[in-house]
Image (cartoon, rainbow, N blue to C red):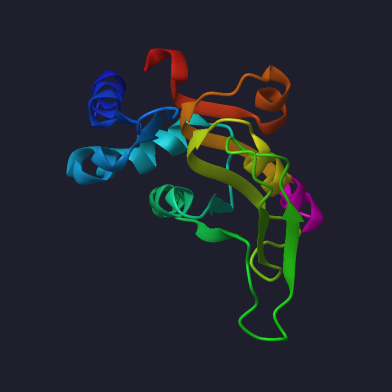
Amino acid sequence: MERGELRERLKIGLRWRSDAGQESLADVTGWWRDPELLQALGPALAEANPKAAPTVVAGPASKGMLLGALVAAHLGVGFVEVRKNPSRAYDSDAWWQRTTPPDYQDRHLRMGFRRDLIRSGDRVLFVDDWIATGGQALTVQALVEDAGASWAGASVIVDSLDDSRARRALQLSSLLHIREL
């Protein structure tokens, strides 16, 4: 799918939803229903960050896990799910964990992944649907560094960051900017 068509289909599949007196929230479920768009998202997000050359892709629960797996499959590399408020399945599980700064809902989330999934020498590409404050991505970046791996960049569908310093630190690439919606 050509990039212009992909961007238009992303715009068409997005709905703004709100309850009386509440801020509008983006409903991206229309993206998952369009099979051609779904098929194109992995390659598009991988190509958004062409110099990344990752050995592994990481994505946070829940939409980052869906998109990250699509990108990893396209690139032929592994995928690591980043869990929010993770719990260990066994006492022997060792985890890298950190707490995020406040997110767009003013929450602090505990994020993490099993220590054996990202290793020294890995180059990690972060993938998610939307970036608002950058808190989750910056936390995953710190976790990647904790693991002794290298940050290869971040690819998202929608960039709504206000902080250009975070954008640079994350080496962020996006398919759309919030002002286009």
User: Which stretch is magenta?
Assistant: 142-150
Is 149 magenta? The answer is yes
Please determine whether, in this image, residue 180 is positioned above or below residue 131.
above
Residue 47 picture location, percent across and down: 44, 33
Residue 151 in the figure: left or right of residue 41: right
Q: Residue at x 39, y 14 (%)?
A: 180
Q: Nearer the viewer, residue 109 or 123?
A: 109
Dividing the image into 4 quarters, which one contains the C terminus? top left
Q: Residue furthest front?
A: 21
Count of marks, rendered view: 0
Q: Nearer the viewer, residue 96 or 122?
A: 96
Q: Nearer the viewer, residue 21 or 164?
A: 21
Q: Residue at x 64, y 73 (%)?
A: 87
Is 50 magenta? The answer is no
Q: Residue at x 73, y 47 (%)?
A: 150
Q: Nearer the viewer, residue 37 or 29?
A: 29
Q: Residue furthest top?
A: 179
Residue 73 in the figure: left or right of residue 15: right
Residue 179 picture location, percent across and down: 44, 13
Q: In terms of image quadrants, where is residue 69?
A: bottom left
Q: Residue at x 47, y 48 (%)?
A: 64
Residue 148 picture location, percent across and down: 80, 56
Please determine whether, in this image, residue 1 is positioned above or below residue 108.
above
Q: In terms of image quadrants, where is residue 146?
A: bottom right
Please determine whether, in this image, residue 25 is positioned above or below residue 72.
above
Dividing the image into 4 quarters, which one contains the N terminus? top left
Residue 147 picture location, percent across and down: 77, 59
